[in-house]
Image (spheres, grey):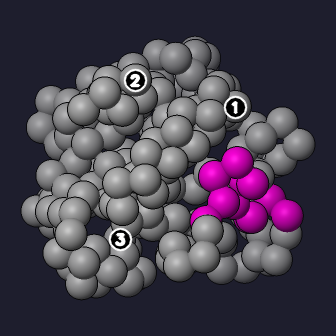
């Protein structure tokens, strides 16, 4: 049995142009994520989906019970693939993700999803801190423009800075084609 699992973080409708929080490059990220997921399925590597919802109905986005909280159809789970519901950026915080991974003897997690600067960052760091080897497929992730000190930081720079920081001590960063060629 494989000791690797793919963790698909928050690839939900809310992040697409019709949602409340559209991300830059989300369509390309989901296309790449679908390729990573398909490879995992063909290799019998577990695929675990993570879905974010806020715990209250007055949230600005990811409102429970709305279409925005649903996993995008291009990367939807198939029968037998678990979906972890989370309420925090860290996919391990107050969820059973670690227990799921440990029950399968997982040693390496492949992280894909959204948003690079929030849930991908928090989940990757937590996975590393919990002792998992982390492989992050950067072009199967997306983020958004951010603002700091009155200056807009373009999504590509936000993403690059996060990937550089994670590569420094928390994860091995790769791209879809390289990952699939392994």
Q: Is residue 158 above or below residue 85?
A: above
Task: Estimate how packed mark 3 is, as few (under 14), some (14 to 19) or many (20 or more) residues with alpha carbons within 10 Å.
Answer: many
Residue tagged 3 = 92
Relative to 52, 121 lies left or right: left
Residue at image location 31% in from the left, 27% down from the top: 181
Mark 3 and mark 1 lie on one chain; the one further toward the N terminus is 1
Relative to 71, 128 lies left or right: left
Q: Nearer the viewer, residue 143 or 97?
A: 97
Residue tagged 2 = 177
* Residue segment shown in magenta: 67-77
Q: Is residue 18 above or below residue 9?
A: above
Distance, label 3 to label 1, CA atoms, is 26 Å
Relative to 90, 146 lies left or right: right
Q: Position of residue 28 (x, y in %)?
A: 63, 27
Q: Does residue 129 appear anywhere in the picture?
A: yes
Residue at image location 65% in from the left, 79% down from the top: 55
Distance, label 2 to label 3, CA atoms, is 28 Å
Residue tagged 1 = 27
């Amino acid at each position: 049995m494989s000791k690797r699992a793919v963790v698909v973080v928050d690839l939900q409708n809310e992040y697409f142009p019709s949602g409340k929080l559209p991300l830059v490059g989300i369509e390309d990220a989901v296309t790449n994520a679908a390729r990573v997921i398909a490879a995992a399925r063909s290799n019998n590597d577990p695929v675990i989906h993570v879905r974010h919802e806020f715990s209250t109905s007055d949230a600005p986005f990811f409102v429970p019970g709305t279409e925005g909280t649903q996993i995008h159809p291009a990367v939807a789970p198939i029968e037998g693939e678990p979906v972890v519901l989370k309420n925090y950026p860290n996919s391990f915080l107050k969820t059973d993700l670690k227990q799921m991974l440990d029950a399968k003897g997982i040693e390496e997690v492949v992280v894909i999803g959204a948003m690079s600067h929030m849930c991908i960052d928090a989940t990757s760091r937590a996975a590393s801190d919990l002792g998992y080897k982390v492989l992050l497929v950067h072009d199967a992730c997306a983020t958004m423009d951010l603002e700091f000190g009155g200056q807009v930081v373009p999504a590509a720079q936000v993403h690059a800075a996060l990937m550089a920081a994670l590569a420094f001590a928390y994860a091995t960063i790769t791209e879809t084609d390289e990952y699939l060629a392994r």
